[in-house]
Image (cartoon, rainbow, N blue to C red):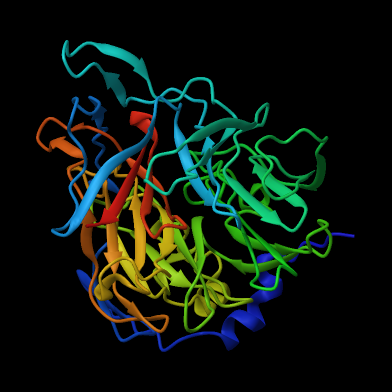
Amino acid sequence: MKRFIPMLAILPLAIACNSNNKTSGGPTDTVTTKTDQEVALPAPNEKAAKSKFSKVIGWPDGKTPTAPEGFTVTKFAGNIKSPRNIYIAPNGDILAVLSNSERSTKEKVVDAVSGKAKSEQGGKSANTVVLFRDTNNDGKPDLQTQFISGLNQPYGVLIIGNAFYVANTDGLYKYPYKTGDTKITGTGTKILELPAGGYNNHWTRNLIASPDNSKIYITVGSGSNVAENGIENEKRRANILQINPDGTGEVIYASGLRNPVGVAWAPGTGALWTAVNERDGLGDDLVPDYVTSVKQGAFYGWPYSYYGQHEDPRLKGQNPELVKSAIVPDIAVGSHTASLGLAFYKDTKFPAKYQGGMFIGQHGSWNRSSLSGYKVAFIPFKAGVKAGALEDFLTGFIADQEKGEVYGRPVGVAVAKDGSLLVADDVSNTIWRVAAK
């Protein structure tokens, strides 16, 4: 039987995991994180919240994103509808998950030449996983197949032995699989129900297996911004769930994570890391999205507090005991950047600086007066520990900051078997390949 642990049930564990949080009042609050990184946070201001939606104009012929000196950027795949996530199978096959939010947004897709709107983001999700195989290792796929279709807003996929898993927005499915398969032909079984619906694209359900494949971790975003529809409607949400590979034994591994999406194991420490989208409506520079190691049983604040024990003014005083247990995440990566993709570079093809480091796909802001994100960022790590500041890696997605025009928006990132970095650009229907020269 699956069991649900409410937020209050994990309070003792969360307190035990609590870090040396430090807060101070006034117009600017300074938080000291577990890694002694200081993050200056402005005072929250609900009246200061702004919106600026990007307008997608598409990539002109021959133009690509920009990587640092010593790298080349090429189009690995194109004309695939809304690639969101990328998974590298154990045999090196590349699985691209094609899906979107199935809702209209204000972000128009505009023809780069005529300037006329072609369509809106959202609409019908492709609900498909496409397989790419590069048999001669030239950086171009020799085989492309429709691996599986007829899904319901899929995001996370996973292969464990002879099983293929896909996380739809409303449930986890398991299918028979054998190495080298180019299409799923067997019938899937729904092994776990997942809560669906909700606010602002929190429909993604990502997957990762423990290193020994004995557990599966599932990310489930909140169904609201700050539980404005009632915390009773957030059961099993804003969490990372842990289950057995057969779908049994569910526990809440960590909670208070508003919208965790990217997940990866850090080389060296073996810690589980996640990329989290924080809340909207408190101003341009609140609240920072973050990447953090995930402690079992820990509570990360949502919805009552942010970045540790900073109370959200919209929920002030509603759960002070739980707020006291909230721990500070490891690394802030910019407010409203929509940091979704996450991958550690575990190969040796890139220069030494990048080996062991973290890549973050930042889909880009809308709840801000100027665009932020819209790039792939990089953080140096050594032996699984942060070893340098956040920096730009793949840029050039913003065409015109003033007009809010963008060529594309990066989402999922993955390191292919040949050591290249693959980047899903959902609105331009493209997967980019970044390789060291």
Image location (x, y in percent) of residue 159? 67, 54
| Residue 86 shown left or right of residue 278 in the figure | right
- Which image quarter holds the C terminus? bottom left
What residue lies at 69% left-to-right and 73% top-to-bottom? 212
Image location (x, y in percent) of residue 142? 47, 36
Vertical comparison of 157 with 320: above or below: above
Image location (x, y in percent) of residue 436? 25, 59
Asked which quadrant contains residue 155, the reply is top right
Vertical comparison of 197 with 178: above or below: above
Image location (x, y in percent) of residue 56? 26, 27
> Of 284 and 389, which appears nearest the observer?
389
What residue lies at 41% left-to-right and 89% top-to-bottom? 20
What residue lies at 20% left-to-right and 71% top-to-bottom? 28
- Which image quarter holds the N terminus? bottom right
Vertical comparison of 362 with 102: above or below: below
What residue lies at 26% left-to-right and 49% top-to-bottom? 373
> Of 23 and 419, which appears nearest the observer?
419
| Residue 186 shown left or right of residue 266 in the figure | right
> Of 26 and 422, which appears nearest the observer?
422
> Of 106 and 313, which appears nearest the observer?
106
Specify whether residue 366 is in view.
no
Asked which quadrant contains residue 321, the reply is bottom right
Asked which quadrant contains residue 379, the reply is bottom left
